[in-house]
Image (tube, rainbow, N blue to C red):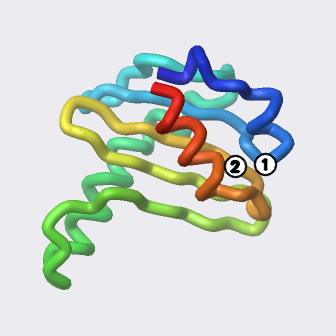
Amino acid sequence: MFKDANTEHLSRLGYIGSIECSASGSILEATGDDLEVFGQILGYTAQIANMIGEPFGLDAVEEVHLVGTNTTAICIPQEESSLGILCTSRASTEQILSELIDQE
């Protein structure tokens, strides 16, 4: 999924890397080596988001944004896998997501 992404251009927008994991947590594809820990928690993040959203009437969570001081993690649950994207905290996340998803 990420092999056709222009990572040099995305890096200028604040992109750090991306990962796709199966429902069991195994890494299907990653753009860098530093994403293993993110991949391990990606599936749990989607499960927790759904547990939090359920009482508020959110049927299915489409995106989870975890914003830290230096880094933003975006988790996108899908049917068979989950996508994770790491960016700097000041990144243009909407533009990065748009370009990554549109390149498929």
| Closer-to-camera residue (42/100) | 100
Residue 1, given in percent of the width and then of the height, sits at 47, 21
Left or right of residue 79: residue 15? right
Q: Secondary structure at mark 1?
A: loop
> Which disc, if any, is residue 87?
2
Are the residues tagged 1 and 2 within 8 Å (C-beta)? yes
Q: Nearer the viewer, residue 33 or 15?
A: 15
Decide which of tag 1 and tag 2 comes sooner along the chain: 1
Q: Is residue 77 left or right of residue 60?
A: right
Residue assigned mark 1: 14
Where is residue 57? Give x, y as percent: 14, 80
Residue at image location 34% in from the left, 29% down from the top: 25
Disc 1 residue crowd, few under 14, some 14–19, many 20+, Cα 10 Å: some
Distance, label 1 to label 2, CA atoms, is 5 Å
Q: Amino acid at mark 1?
A: Gly
User: Which quadrant would residue 20 be assigned to in this image?
Assistant: top left
Which secondary structure, mark 2? strand
Query: Residue 55's spot in the image, x, y percent?
Result: 15, 81
77, above or below 55, in the image: above
Q: Is residue 84 left or right of residue 94?
A: left
Q: Tell which of 93 and 30 is nearer to you.
A: 93
Residue 99: where, in percent of width, then height? 59, 40
Residue type, label 2: Cys
The answer to whether 73 is drawn above or below residue 54 in the figure is above
Q: Residue at x 21, y 67 (%)?
A: 51
Identify the residue shown where x is 44% and y is 43%: 41
Dot 2 crowding, Cα within 10 Å, few <14, some 14–19, many 20+: many
Q: Quadrant of the C terminus?
A: top left
